[in-house]
Image (cartoon, grey):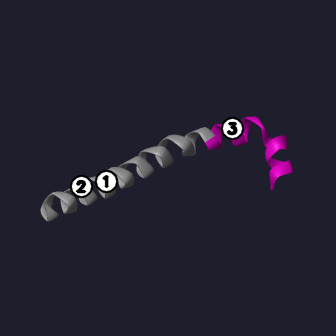
Amino acid sequence: MKSATSLRYIVVATYEEWLDGRVAWRITPTLAKRKEGRRETWSLLD
């Protein structure tokens, strides 16, 4: 039972790391495009 719980933690941690990497990879180009297209909006936010 303990080993199954440990395995679950490993799987969850690995999935969260993968998800974080995937989200960052998808968001970064989007932010770059948005920054190019809406420079005036970003200057208000900065």
**Amino acid at the residue labelled 2:** Arg
45 relative position to 10: left or right: right
Q: Nearer the viewer, residue 11 or 40?
A: 11
Identify the residue shown where x is 31% and y is 53%.
12
Distance of mark 1 from mark 2, alpha carbons?
A: 6 Å
**Amino acid at the residue labelled 1:** Val
23 relative position to 31: left or right: left
Residue 2: x percent and y percent? 15, 64
Q: Which residues are magenta?
A: 31-46
Dot 3 surroundings within 10 Å: few (below 14), some, or many (20 or more)? few
Magenta span contains residue 42: yes
Q: In the image, which is nearer the foreground, mark 3 or mark 1?
A: 1
Residue 40: x percent and y percent? 85, 42
Disc 3, SS: helix
Ranked by sequence position, the earlier of labels 3 and 1 is 1
Q: Which residue is mark 1?
A: 12
Dot 2 surroundings within 10 Å: few (below 14), some, or many (20 or more)? few
Q: Nearer the viewer, residue 10 or 26?
A: 10
Q: Which residue is mark 3?
A: 34
**Amino acid at the residue labelled 3:** Arg
Q: Are marks 1 and 2 in contact (CB under 8 Å)?
A: yes
Dot 1 surroundings within 10 Å: few (below 14), some, or many (20 or more)? few
Distance of mark 3 from mark 1, alpha carbons?
A: 32 Å
Question: Which label was assigned to residue 8?
Answer: 2
Instruction: Tell me the chief SS of the magenta region.
Output: helix
Residue 17: x percent and y percent? 37, 55
Quadrant including the N terminus: bottom left
Disc 2, SS: helix
Question: Which label was assigned to residue 31?
Answer: none
